C-alpha cells in the first residue's frame, strides 16, 4: 500500500503549498487506486503543517510551488516530495498510477528542479518511478 | 519582439520596473512584460498561454486571489501585500494591484495585474529596525538571536525543555512562545510556580485528587497535568521541589503516566513539559538536593537566557513595549522615555532584569502627566544611584557608560590615573581627555 497526498485547490494542484489548505490523500496498491479522501491542512507554521501532513502517514507529497523552509520541514518528516507540479489533479493521479513520470511534463513554468527523496525503504518505490525514462 | 514595432502602450509597459501581466476570461496569461520576466524568473514565451497561478505562484493565488476579487466586484485592488515563491524556493515579497480589462464595447475581456518587487524595501526595513521577532518576543541582541534561531526547531520537537536564567529574564514568555509555535498551540498552556506552593499542595495541584483521598476532598479535582492534556505544562522554579515530588515527577517523565491522589488507576500524561529555574541545577545535583536522573530527564534541550545587563541594546525596545502596554491599561498617551531617561536605563545594571524595568516604567507612569518619561519621574533609588555620575557634559548613554567604566577603573587603581589608563588599555592622555570631557571629578589623594 502506498499513500500519496496531492495539494488540492478546485481540482487543480494548489499553486502554493505554503498557503494551501486541502490535501487529497490517495491510497494505491500495485498501480491501482484503492480509495481517496480530503484532509484539511490550514495550519500557519511550516512545522505544524509538515506534522499535520505526516500525521496522515503519507509517503509522498505532490504539490505546487513550495518555499524552502516548508520543503525542509516536510522532508524532515520522511515524506518524499514532488514540488512545482501543476495541472488537473485527477489527470495527474491517473498519469501517476499509469506509471508515467509527473515531471517534467507537468512542471510549473520555469521549474526544472531536482526532487527531494528521503532515503527510506518505502520511498525506493517512488524513487524508481521518478528515474523511469 | 523588436522595440521599433511596439505600440506606445506596449513600449511604456516594457520600460517600467513593475511586473505586469494580463489574463483572459479563462485565466490564461495573454501578456507578460519584461519586468515580470525579471521578477519571476520566467520567460515570456513560457508564461503566455499558461494558467496565471501556475506562473505567478503568489501567496494570494487560490483562496484570496486579488484578480478573482476584481473580476467578481469590478473594483480594482491597490497595493495588496504578499509573496511569490520563486522556482528555487525563495519567497519574494511583492505588492499587487489589479484592474479589469474591457473591450471597445465595454464588455469585460479579462484583467490586468501589476506587481512590485518589495524585497529591497523589506530588507531595508529590517535593517533599519535591526530587530527580530517571534511571537511576542522582540530583540536586537545577538545573544537573543541565537535563542530565536533555536525556537522554531525546539517548538516543533516534542522534547522536554529546560529554561535557565536569572529571575525576571522572561523564562515564562519564552515557554509561552515555544508553546505557541508548537503543534500543541491550540491546546492549553498551563503554568505552575513550584516554589509558590507547599509540597503537599503542589502534589495535589499537579496530579489532582479523587473524592475522599483526604479530609476535605469532597469531589474529584483534576490536576494541572490533566488540565494541560494535549498542551504544554510549564513548571517554573523546578529547582525548589522536594525530593519526594522529584521522584513522582521523574516517573511521569519516564513513563508518561501518573496517578491522582487517592486513585488506583494510572492516567496518561499527554503533555509537553517545559521546566525553568534560576538556580544552578548541576550544582544542586552535586550537593544532592536535586536528583541526577531527573536533571538528565529535563535537561534535554536547554535554553539559557542572558540577564538584561548583557542585552542592553534591547532596553529601548522593551521600554517602547511597556509604554505601549501601560498606555492601553492606564488610558494615557505617553510617547516614550526622554533621551536622559534612556541613558540612565542603559547605564544601570538591572539586577531584577526585565521585571525590574517593567516595574520602573509602571511606577513612572503613575507620576508622569506629560508626553515623556523624564528623569524626575523615576524612583529615587535609581536617580540617586546616578547623581554622582551624571554631569552636564554627558549627552548620551555612551558617555554615561564611558564614565561608569572610567570611575570603576579609577576606584580599582586608588584614583591613580596612570594606573587606571594602563588598566583600561588606553593612553594616559586619552584618559585625561575623557575625564575632562565627561566632567568626572577625581578626588585628590
Image (tube, grey):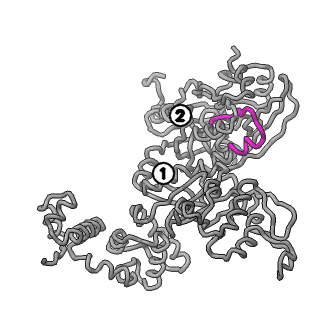
Q: Position of residue B28 (x, y in %)?
A: 65, 32
Q: Position of residue B398 (x, y in %)?
A: 28, 65
- Per the rendering, the mark at residue B146 is 1
Q: Please report the bounds of the magenta region as a residue range.
A: A50-66
Chain name for mark 1? B
Nearer the observer: mark 1 or 2; the answer is 1
Can residue B105 be seen from the camera position used here? Answer: no
Q: Quadrant of the C terminus of chain B?
A: bottom left
Please check whether the numbered discs 1 and 2 fall on a single chain: yes
Check disc 2 and report the residue beneath it.
B40
Magenta-span inclusion, residue A53: yes
Characterize the local packing of mark 1: few (<14), some (14-19) or many (20 or more) Cα atoms within 10 angstroms.
Answer: few
- Image height check: is B144 above or below A88? below
Residue in view at x 61 percent, y 51 percent: B300
Q: Secondary structure at mark 2?
A: helix
Magenta-span inclusion, residue B325: no
> To which quarter of the image does residue B309 belong?
bottom left
Amino acid at each position: 500500500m502506498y499513500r500519496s497526498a496531492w495539494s488540492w485547490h478546485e481540482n487543480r494542484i494548489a499553486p502554493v503549498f505554503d498557503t494551501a489548505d486541502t490535501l487529497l490523500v490517495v491510497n494505491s496498491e500495485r498501480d491501482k487506486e484503492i480509495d481517496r479522501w480530503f484532509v484539511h491542512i490550514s495550519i500557519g507554521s511550516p512545522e505544524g503543517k509538515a506534522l499535520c501532513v505526516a500525521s496522515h502517514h503519507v509517503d509522498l507529497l505532490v504539490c505546487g510551488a513550495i518555499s524552502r523552509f516548508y520543503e525542509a520541514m516536510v522532508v524532515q518528516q520522511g515524506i518524499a516530495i514532488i514540488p512545482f507540479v501543476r495541472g488537473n489533479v485527477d489527470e495527474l493521479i491517473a498519469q501517476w498510477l499509469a506509471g508515467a513520470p509527473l515531471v517534467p511534463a507537468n512542471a510549473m513554468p520555469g521549474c526544472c528542479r531536482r526532487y527531494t527523496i528521503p532515503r527510506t525503504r518505502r520511498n525506493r518505490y517512488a524513487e524508481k518511478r521518478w528515474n523511469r525514462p | 519582439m523588436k522595440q521599433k514595432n511596439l505600440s506606445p502602450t506596449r513600449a511604456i509597459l516594457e520600460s517600467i520596473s513593475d511586473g505586469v501581466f494580463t489574463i483572459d476570461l479563462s485565466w490564461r496569461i495573454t501578456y507578460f512584460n519584461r519586468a515580470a520576466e525579471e521578477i519571476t524568473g520566467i520567460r515570456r514565451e513560457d508564461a503566455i498561454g499558461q494558467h496565471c497561478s501556475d506562473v505567478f505562484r503568489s501567496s494570494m493565488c487560490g483562496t484570496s486571489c486579488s484578480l478573482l476579487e476584481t473580476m467578481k466586484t469590478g473594483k480594482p485592488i491597490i497595493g495588496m501585500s504578499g509573496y511569490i515563491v520563486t522556482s528555487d524556493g525563495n519567497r519574494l515579497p511583492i505588492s499587487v494591484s489589479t484592474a479589469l480589462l474591457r473591450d471597445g464595447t465595454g464588455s469585460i475581456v479579462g484583467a490586468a495585474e501589476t506587481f512590485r518587487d518589495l524585497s529591497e524595501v523589506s530588507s531595508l526595513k529590517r535593517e533599519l529596525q535591526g530587530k527580530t521577532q517571534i511571537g511576542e518576543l522582540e530583540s536586537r541582541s545577538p545573544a537573543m538571536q541565537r535563542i530565536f534561531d533555536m525556537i522554531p526547531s525546539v517548538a516543533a520537537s516534542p522534547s522536554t525543555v529546560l529554561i535557565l536564567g536569572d529571575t525576571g529574564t522572561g523564562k515564562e514568555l519564552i515557554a509561552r512562545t515555544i508553546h505557541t509555535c508548537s503543534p500543541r498551540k491550540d491546546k492549553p498552556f498551563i503554568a505552575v510556580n513550584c516554589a509558590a506552593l507547599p509540597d503537599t499542595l503542589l502534589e495535589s495541584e499537579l496530579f489532582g485528587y479523587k473524592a475522599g483521598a483526604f479530609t476535605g476532598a469532597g469531589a474529584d479535582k483534576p490536576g494541572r497535568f490533566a488540565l494541560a492534556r494535549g498542551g504544554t505544562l510549564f513548571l517554573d522554579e523546578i529547582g525548589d521541589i522536594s525530593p519526594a515530588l522529584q521522584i513522582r515527577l521523574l516517573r511521569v517523565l519516564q513513563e508518561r503516566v501518573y496517578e491522582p491522589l487517592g486513585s488506583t488507576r494510572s492516567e496518561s500524561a499527554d503533555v509537553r513539559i517545559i521546566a525553568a529555574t534560576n538556580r544552578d541545577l548541576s550544582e544542586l545535583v552535586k550537593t544532592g538536593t536535586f536528583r541526577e536522573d531527573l536533571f538528565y530527564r529535563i535537561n534535554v534541550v536547554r535554553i539559557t537566557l542572558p540577564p538584561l545587563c548583557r542585552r542592553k541594546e534591547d532596553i529601548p525596545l522593551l521600554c517602547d513595549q511597556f509604554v505601549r502596554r501601560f498606555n492601553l491599561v492606564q488610558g494615557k498617551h505617553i510617547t516614550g522615555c526622554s533621551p536622559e531617561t534612556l541613558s540612565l536605563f542603559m547605564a544601570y545594571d538591572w539586577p531584577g532584569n526585565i521585571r525590574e524595568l517593567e516595574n520602573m516604567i509602571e511606577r513612572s507612569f503613575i507620576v508622569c502627566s506629560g508626553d515623556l518619561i523624564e528623569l524626575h519621574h523615576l524612583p529615587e533609588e535609581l536617580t540617586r544611584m546616578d547623581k554622582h555620575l551624571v554631569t552636564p557634559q554627558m549627552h548620551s548613554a555612551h558617555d554615561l557608560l564611558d564614565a561608569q567604566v572610567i570611575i570603576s577603573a579609577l576606584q580599582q587603581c586608588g584614583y591613580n590615573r596612570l594606573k587606571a589608563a594602563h588598566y583600561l588599555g588606553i593612553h594616559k592622555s586619552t584618559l585625561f581627555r575623557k575625564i575632562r570631557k565627561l566632567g568626572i571629578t577625581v578626588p585628590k589623594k
